[in-house]
Image (cartoon, rainbow, N blue to C red):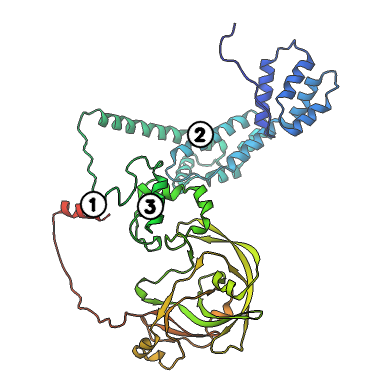
Amino acid sequence: MYRGPTPTIPKFSHPDPGEFARLRIALENLLPPDWTELFKYQILVDHLKLEEARMIADAYLNSPTPFTDTMAALHEKFGQPHQLALRRIAIVLESPDIKRGDISAFQRFALQVQSLVGLLRTLGRDGELELSCGSHVARLLSKLPPEQRAEFCRHMLRQPGTAPNLVDLSNWLRYETWCHSYDAEPMSKVSHTKHDSGKRTVTILHGIGESQSETPIPRKGPVSQTKPVRTWIRSNNHCWRCARAHHAAQCDLKKPCNICQGTHLRPLHEVNVNPSHKEDSANVEKSCLTNSSPDRFFLDKPSVGGRVMLKVVPVNLHYEDHTLDTFALLDDGSERTILLSTAVKALGIQGVPEELPLWTVRDDIQVLNGSSISFQISPLCKPQTCYKINHAFTAEHLNLSRQSYPVEQIQQKYGHLRGLPIRTLTDVQPLLLIGSDQPHLITPTEPVRWGGPGTPAAVHTRLGWTIQGPIPPMGWTPAARQCLLTSMAPQDELFQNVQWL
């Protein structure tokens, strides 16, 4: 008497020929041949979860042999060997590409190809035609890294006069898989020997003097510490890449994470890769693009130290009977014109609801729920000339950086800017960002006034004159350049570099 585990009959829930084949084999081996047709038919119906299969079974409900007729109809619909082969070929050909160094994915890919070849060999002539198809080999090879494709070509050069087929690819994959498993054994033995050598291991951790109260970057258990770290970074306006006291857009970290190859420190891997979806969905409007401020998006990057000027012009905005005096930022790199909600409320503009995806510095997408609006704009110097702006976007929590340009001092310093009607800007707040969807408003209407490398340029647009480019701080004088040399022991230099990191 059999005393092993009780066998089970699988469910047929998907139109998969392989799933039906497993059901058919289970029924043929588990149902005694002397049982009645109705009893076996009832068991079959209980395991048919696919709607099409149940409809086929219902068609033979009153048949003298319902089980036999239903199985024959199901076999004709789902159980043809060529259907299973085509399904298996599609699965293998649609599998993802193999990344360089991913041994487990390569071994899984090799097993899929070997299983496909074994199935095609059982189909007779039809299977032989598929095995000799060169296009299958070409598509499967395209999923491998370039160096492995080259290795297969070198392997086939040893067999001149033969075109590669699926059997050749399967044999080569089996050989490569064996080589990978052979290489893994000595590594495990060496690591085991090192642990059992009895030598004392000392771990030295170099810090910068910070305490646990200053930064909560987890020393162990990073998954459980992810939420406190994220909260600390947001509340203290620190960088999410390195946890230092600057914005993420200003981070100069170069070394990638050794887990995901992203540009962030290893202890911050969980914060960057697995953000809290519940928290992000609840506070999606509290995220930011260029800083860690929890209440607004900045559409532009504030210039460091005021050394770069953007194209800002004074304008008048018009909507029905309302007019607003403000400033507009002309941004050639923006794909969409955006009006801040402050101006929308002041003008009483009514728009059409719209969602706008924005790329953040974390290389993810923030979806803003806002509106598509239309209004008119005129230059401050020519208020009677109006231009129509259609399909601009507006949403809450959007912001633009304040700008300050000492135009009078700049004009005194640079002769090519003298005499131009450009206003001095003192901590002004632009409320409108005009992007490349309005090229007639941001492109120059006459030659640009430029004084050479390192000097600002004056641009005349339909909205008036504006200034753009780098300027040195006022009162700045070039300091004498010095070359200071120092020397230290290599170990001390290495220690200082580790501390700096």
Q: Residue furthest top?
A: 1
Which of the pair 373/124 is nearer the observer?
A: 373
Q: Amino acid at mark 3?
A: Trp
Residue 225 is marked as none
* Mark 2 → mark 3, Cα distance in angstroms: 55 Å
Q: Secondary structure at mark 1?
A: loop
**Disc 3 + disc 1, Cβ < 8 Å:** no
Q: Quadrant of the C terminus?
A: bottom left
* Mark 1 → mark 2, Cα distance in angstroms: 58 Å
Residue beneath the point at 48% across and 63% down: 296
| x, y percent for residue 392 | 60, 71
Q: Mark 3 or 1, which is nearer the eye?
A: 3
Q: Secondary structure at mark 3?
A: helix
Residue 171 is marked as 2
Position of 447 relative to 347 (above/below): below
| x, y percent for residue 72 | 77, 25
Residue under label 3: 232
